[in-house]
Amino acid sequence: MAAQRRSIAWSELKVGMLVVTSFFLLAAAIFYISSGSGSPLSPKYTIVAYFASANGLRPGGEVWLEGVTVGNVADVRISKLPDPSKSVEVEMKLQAAYQNIIRSDSQVSIETKGLLGDNIVEITRGSVAGQMVPNGGTLQGEEAGDIKKIITGTNDFIANLDVLSEQVKKMATRVDQGEGTLGKLLTDTSVYDNLNKTTAEANALVRDARTGNGTIGRLMHDDELYTKVNGTVDRLNKMMDYVDAGNGTLGKFYKDPALANHADQLITRFQTIADNIDRGKGTLGKFVTDDALWNDARRTMARVDGLMDSIQNGEGTIGKAIKDPTLFNTLNQTSSEVLKLLYDFRQNPKKYLTINFKLF
């Protein structure tokens, strides 16, 4: 009986050990599959990344390298460094096989899987110019947009849409009440009436054109204008042929190279004259290049200005004549005396024409 009990206990123990081992293997397999960081026995190394904010990142979060899981977040803690951009330390356990890819110029950021998913650490591949990050090395993380910022921006957008909808409602109310240009167009029948009148006038115009009435109708139905235009085109073609043949004055201008030669010679002569003037030759050259004429003109103008000032001041004979009224008064009196003399002469010419003869 005792031997039978020992046999049953040993069997139960083996079953229990098998169940525990199975659970252990299952847990190890689940951890291996969920972690995605390679074999638990594969070599690892540590990198510390600094961020301004953890953005809800927790230990155990995945670390991606170009979208591939290469490790996990070991710890997230507050940094003791005073730099605001290094307020949070994120310690990451990464597979050593990717150590040569992660370099000093790799970019590190905290991203979100989906819109409301878990936070992960995203690392980009470094370049050849960057240095390989050693075990225990550091990288500076970059600030990435989080869900809070997205939600805040969405709220602002919704608020703006609300304000815009209210403005549209007010505008629609004003239009429905007939206010403004658009309201007048929708509610006032005069626009329709004017458009109807315009359409009627357009129909009448088309009808007159079809029946041959008016200028447009004559242009459309009478061949006289076409005949005249065709005759004019024929005359223009003949004239162009005449000119192209070198006939007439215009043909000579067009065909005869003598005009071009004369123009070239004239331009050459003008160029020679211009060169001579520029070199100061001849009278015109002296006028253009010699400063003596300018100086003489300035002196003459100065003397003329002085003379005019003297005249305005009443100096000299001309100044006296302009400024002093005595000459005007004298001339006025003289003209009066002359008029009196002429009047007396006309009244009694014998008085002035009598000749006395005396004998000694």
Image (cartoon, rainbow, N blue to C red):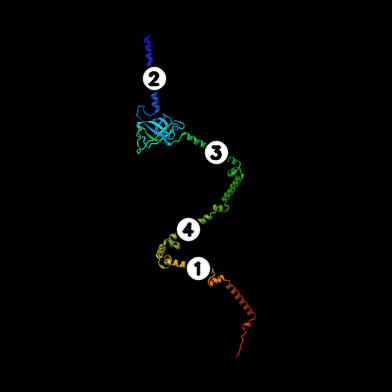
Image quarter of the C terminus: bottom right
Q: Check if mark 2's residue and mark 4's residue have beta carbons within 8 Å.
A: no
Q: Mark 1 = which residue?
A: 306
Disc 3 packing (10 Å; few <14; some 14–19; many ≥20): few
Question: Callout 4 environment at 10 Å: few (<14), some (14 to 19), or many (20+)?
Answer: few
Q: Is the residue 279 above or below the residue 70 in the image?
A: below
Question: Is residue 227 positioned above or below 269 on the image?
Answer: above
Q: What amino acid does circle 3 point to?
A: Val
Earlier residue among tags 4 and 1: 4
Give the camera-side residue of 28 and 181: 28
Mark 3 — residue? Answer: 163
Name the element at disc 4: helix
Front position among marks 3 and 4 = 3
Q: Cα distance, mark 2 to mark 4?
A: 113 Å
Tell me which amino acid carries mark 1. Gly
Q: Which residue is mark 4?
A: 236
Q: Say left or right for 190 vs 270.
A: right
In the image, residue 265 lies at what x, y percent? 40, 64
Residue 354 lies, in percent from the top left, at: 62, 84
Q: Earlier in the sequence, mark 3 or mark 1?
A: 3
Identify the mark at residue 20; answer none if there is no mark: 2
